[in-house]
Image: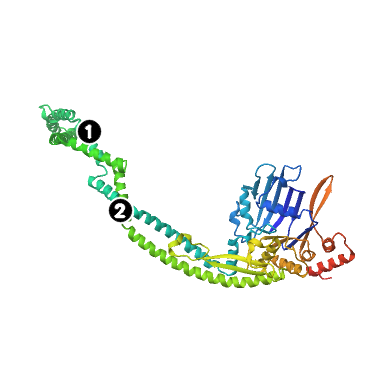
């Protein structure tokens, strides 16, 4: 609900602040006093489009501010930039002469469209041009499903239809791939065979390059090996021969002095090292002489590896990774027939379930529509639309498993509210023919039927009294007061019958001071309300009789004891 509301520099309003209360509030005033400007201000703070022409003459911008009290269980809190702000939210809107203006929620700058998304959780406005709820077929369907207690089934219908469309898309993808299946399988088989026939090993490229480097420098290496063998083994004064002699001498010395024992042991280790080195050199020399054609083989192997790397990966491990992926894809495509068959069965099962759910949903809608038609006709009859007929047109659409993409989350029905406002007129779509006043009363009827458990909201009715009076006006007022037990209700009216039922009464006046027009708003006391209701009864000529009638009306309708 709106706790407080402030408008600066909007049309004839220079600075007006309203502190609104719970329950039923009325705004009255002379024609042209500025009642519509108050509603325009509420529209602006909730993100509706404004015009620089609305800015007060001589001012640079319009500012509108409002503090809203939220229902503790408000489901729209996630729309706010600070969802843990508690049960109050502050919204501000500025509209400059030039530019798009700015919106703030609890001091946080937000896009203007964000304000519009917040509006649905806070305020409903029902005026001559504010009946989007009733003019949109999807909203009519929502209301019927809510009234018929069908939302739980509809949610299951939506879930099943979404799953069906997902399966249908997957099936379409598989069928598309099936057309290329044979070509892809042949191509993958070629790639797999080519890599497998190469018999690659992860580390072989590095080993081959190392061996190739040795073979390319074979002559130089041979000379180095021969020199090493001469020094270590072949010459008479080779390292092996000299170490053996030295080992004998030190061994003989250690017989006289034990301090030579470590040296003897160390020399023995050197002898072993030289022997091992010699053995390695001899084997290396023999290996080189036994493989004269290996260089050509290595070059051919490296050429094959390079060719495979250009096709499948930058390294041998990369090629082997590609091989595993190709095998998996080959396996998946090979089994696509089985997957497709399983998917078709899944679609058939889900479609059968979808049909069962939509049949149950349709039954609930038909029964709910019959009850709702009767309830609405009774309500609008009391609200002055005598003998008006209200019907709900339910048209079913046929779907089959071949057109899964066309099924809807809302079921198989199209819903349309029809109205015949006057006897003898045929039923036609409500969204096309009902006037603003009629739509307001139908909306009031829907709100009053008693099926709703909405959270605390502000409901604003403008021109709901269009074309009614007398007893009908009293019925409208009683409905508004009943509705105000659950919501904050604000109504702009010219009828004393409606004004006398409100718990709170605000008068809007316009006056001229120093050639400037000012609109002001005042909450009326009981005596002031008597004066205002008397004016509504008789016009500008207020008499003692009209004052007496106004007081009696106000006292009676408010339940005040004399």
Picture quadrant of residue 2 = bottom right
Looking at the picture, does residue 34 appear above or below residue 450? above
- Quick check: can you spot residue 328? no
Picture disc at residue 89:
none
Q: Position of residue 401 (x, y in %)?
A: 43, 64
Badge 2 marks a residue whose secondary structure is helix
Q: Position of residue 13 (x, y in %)?
A: 76, 49
Q: In which quarter of the image is the N terminus?
A: bottom right
Q: Residues within 10 Å of mark 2 (few under 14, many from 20)?
A: few
Residue labelled with disc 2: 182
Badge 1 marks a residue whose secondary structure is helix
Q: Residues within 10 Å of mark 1 (few under 14, many from 20)?
A: few
- In this picture the colour scheme is rainbow
Which residue lies most toward the right here? 544
Residue labelled with disc 1: 213
**What residue is drawn where x is 73% and y is 50%?**
7
Q: Is residue 159 left or right of residue 542?
A: left
State the CA–CA distance, disc 1 to disc 2: 45 Å
**What residue is drawn where x is 62% and y is 70%?**
372
Comparing marks 1 and 2, which lies closer to the viewer?
2
Label total for image? 2
């Amino acid at each position: 609900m709106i706790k407080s509301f402030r408008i600066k520099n909007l049309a004839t309003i220079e600075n007006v602040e309203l502190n609104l209360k719970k329950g039923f509030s009325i705004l009255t005033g002379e024609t042209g006093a500025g009642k519509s400007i108050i509603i325009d201000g509420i529209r602006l703070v909730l993100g509706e489009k404004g015009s620089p022409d609305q800015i007060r003459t001589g001012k640079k911008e319009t500012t509108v501010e409002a503090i809203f009290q939220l229902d503790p269980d408000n489901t729209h809190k996630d729309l706010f930039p600070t969802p843990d702000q508690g049960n109050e939210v502050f919204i501000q809107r500025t509209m400059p002469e030039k530019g798009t203006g700015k919106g703030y929620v609890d001091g946080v700058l937000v896009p203007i469209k964000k304000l519009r998304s917040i509006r649905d959780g806070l305020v409903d406005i029902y005026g001559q041009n504010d009946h989007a709820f009733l003019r949109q077929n999807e909203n009519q369907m929502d209301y019927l499903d809510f009234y018929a207690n069908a939302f739980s089934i509809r949610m299951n219908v939506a879930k099943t239809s979404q799953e069906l469309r997902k399966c249908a898309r997957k099936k379409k993808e598989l069928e598309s791939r099936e057309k290329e299946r044979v070509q892809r399988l042949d191509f993958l088989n070629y790639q797999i065979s080519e890599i497998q026939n190469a018999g690659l090993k992860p580390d072989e490229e590095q080993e081959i390059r190392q061996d190739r480097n040795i073979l390319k420098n074979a002559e130089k290496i041979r000379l180095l090996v021969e020199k090493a063998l001469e020094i270590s083994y072949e010459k008479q004064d080779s390292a092996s021969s000299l170490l053996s002699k030295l080992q004998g001498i030190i061994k003989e010395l250690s017989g006289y002095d034990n301090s030579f024992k470590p040296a003897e042991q160390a020399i023995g280790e050197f002898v072993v090292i030289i022997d091992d080195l010699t053995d390695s050199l001899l084997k290396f020399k023999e290996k080189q002489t036994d493989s004269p054609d290996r260089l050509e083989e290595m070059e051919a192997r490296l050429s094959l590896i390079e060719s495979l790397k250009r096709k499948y990966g930058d390294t041998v491990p990369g090629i082997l990774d590609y091989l595993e992926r190709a095998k998996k894809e080959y396996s998946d495509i090979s089994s696509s027939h089985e997957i497709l068959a399983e998917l078709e069965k899944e679609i058939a099962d889900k479609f059968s379930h979808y049909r069962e759910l939509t049949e149950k949903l349709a039954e609930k809608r038909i029964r709910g529509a019959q009850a709702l038609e009767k309830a609405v006709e009774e309500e609008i009859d009391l609200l002055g639309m005598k003998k008006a007929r209200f019907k709900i047109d339910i048209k079913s659409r046929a779907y089959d498993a071949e057109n899964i993409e066309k099924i809807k989350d809302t079921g198989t029905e199209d819903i349309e509210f029809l109205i015949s406002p006057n006897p003898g007129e045929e039923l036609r779509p409500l969204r096309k023919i009902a006037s603003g006043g009629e739509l307001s009363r139908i909306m009031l009827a829907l709100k009053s039927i008693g099926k709703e458990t909405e959270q605390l909201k502000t409901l604003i009715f403008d021109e709901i009294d269009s074309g009614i009076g007398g007893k009908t006006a009293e019925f409208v007022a009683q409905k508004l007061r009943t509705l105000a037990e659950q919501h904050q209700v604000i109504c702009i009216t010219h009828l004393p019958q409606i004004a006398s039922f409100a718990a709170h009464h605000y008068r809007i006046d316009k006056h001229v001071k120093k050639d400037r027009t000012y609109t002001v708003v005042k909450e009326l006391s009981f005596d002031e309300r008597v004066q205002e209701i008397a004016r509504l009864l008789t016009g500008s000529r207020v008499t003692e009789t009209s004052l007496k009638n106004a007081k009696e009306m106000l006292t009676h309708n408010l339940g005040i004891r004399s």
